Image (tube, rainbow, N blue to C red):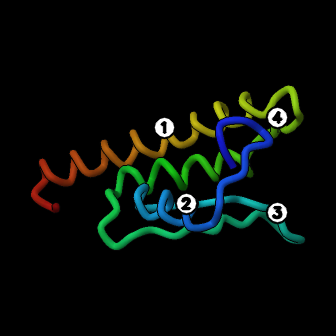
């Protein structure tokens, strides 16, 4: 896992990167449906977590663009779901703050 397809990162470096980000998620499919696995630090920003989870929802929703040629297209497609989740939660939190609920 690195900048180039054949890059490999050692587990201690990967672990530290995950801890630094405050959250990590990945999606997969199992018989009967999709599953999203995630970890989040107790102090992770809610908007950051919403983006990460939305991104993973994007991977298991709609038509995937998985192929060597479309790997980055698939990531960009999933990013749109992450952005939608981020913006939706941002709106809800803003509304709740104005209403005195948060």
Q: Name the N-terminal-most of marks 3 and 2.
A: 2
User: Marks 2 and 1, Cα distance to the nearest angstrom?
Assistant: 27 Å
Tag 4 secondary structure: loop
Q: Which residue is mark 2?
A: 13
Q: Earlier in the sequence, mark 1 or mark 3?
A: 3
Residue linked to disc 3: 29
Position above or below: 79 against 38: above
Where's residue 17, x and y in %? 49, 57
Mark 1, secondary structure of its residue: helix
Q: Earlier in the sequence, mark 3 or mark 4?
A: 3
For the residue carrying disc 4, how many other residues have a C-alpha within 10 Å: few (<14), some (14-19), or many (20+)?
A: some
Element type where label 2 sits in the image: helix
Sequence-first disc among 4 and 1: 4
* Residue 68 falls left or right of residue 17: right
Which numbered marker is on residue 65? 4
Asked if the residue at tag 1 contacts the one at tag 4, i.e. Cβ–Cβ closer than 8 Å, the answer is no
Q: Residue at x 36, y 50 (%)?
A: 47
Does 6 sit left or right of 23 as displayed?
Answer: right
Q: Residues within 10 Å of mark 1 (few under 14, many from 20)?
A: some
Disc on res. 83:
1
Residue at x-position 45% and y-position 53%: 50
- Expressed as whole percent of the image width and height from the top left, the position of residue 90 reads 31, 44
Q: Are marks 2 and 1 in contact (CB under 8 Å)?
A: no
Considering the image in quadrants, where does the C terminus appear?
Answer: bottom left
Separation of residues labelled 2 and 4 (CA atoms)? 29 Å
């Amino acid at each position: 896992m690195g900048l180039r397809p054949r890059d490999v990162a050692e587990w201690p470096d990967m672990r530290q990167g995950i801890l630094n980000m405050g959250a990590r998620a990945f999606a997969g499919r199992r018989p009967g449906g999709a599953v999203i696995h995630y970890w989040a630090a107790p102090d992770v920003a809610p908007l950051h977590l919403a983006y990460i989870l939305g991104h993973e929802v994007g991977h298991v929703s709609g038509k995937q663009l998985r192929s060597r040629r479309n790997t980055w297209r698939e990531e960009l497609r999933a990013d749109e779901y992450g952005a939608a989740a981020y913006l939706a939660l941002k709106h809800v939190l803003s509304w709740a703050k104005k209403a005195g609920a948060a």
